[in-house]
Image: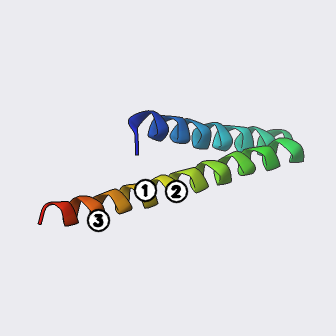
């Protein structure tokens, strides 16, 4: 996973947490939902990147032999 992707995904996750917290504080259900959605999206992207990293590690392990 590229460093830019890691930073972008983490920023999206933190932004989602902030939106959700702001929604909680103001009883704004739309903002809460938007924040939760941002976090879910970032989590899915991070999971996909982890799969790519694992596949690369496996490939590198085979090429070392």
Horizontally, residue 62 falls left or right of residue 38, namely left
> Residue 40 appears at what percent x and percent y?
66, 54
Q: How many marks?
A: 3
Whole-Å distance between the Cαs marked 2 and 3? Answer: 16 Å
> Which residue lies under the disc numbered 2?
48
Position of 64 relative to 16 (above/below): below
> Which residue lies under the disc numbered 3?
58
Residue at 54% over, 41% down: 9
Residue at 37% over, 62% down: 55
> Which residue lies under the disc numbered 1?
52
Whole-Å distance between the Cαs marked 1 and 3? Answer: 10 Å
Horizontally, residue 16 falls left or right of residue 58, namely right
> Residue 28 appears at what percent x and percent y?
88, 42
Horizontally, residue 51 falls left or right of residue 35, namely left
Whole-Å distance between the Cαs marked 2 and 1? Answer: 6 Å
Q: Are marks 2 and 1 in contact (CB under 8 Å)?
A: yes
Position of 61 relative to 12 (above/below): below
Q: In terms of secondary structure, where does tag 3 sit?
A: helix
Q: Local crowd at mark 1 within 10 Å, few (<14), some, or many (≥20)?
A: few
Residue at 45% over, 61% down: 51
**Could you tell which of marks 2 and 3 lies nearer the N-terminus?**
2
> Residue 2 appears at what percent x and percent y?
40, 39
Q: In terms of secondary structure, where does tag 2 sit?
A: helix
């Amino acid at each position: 996973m590229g460093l830019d992707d890691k930073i972008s995904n983490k920023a999206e996750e933190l932004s989602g947490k902030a939106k959700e917290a702001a929604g909680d504080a103001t009883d704004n259900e739309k903002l809460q939902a938007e924040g939760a959605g941002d976090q879910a999206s970032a989590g899915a992207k991070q999971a996909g990147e982890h799969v790519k990293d694992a596949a690369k590690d496996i490939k590198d392990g085979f090429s070392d032999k």
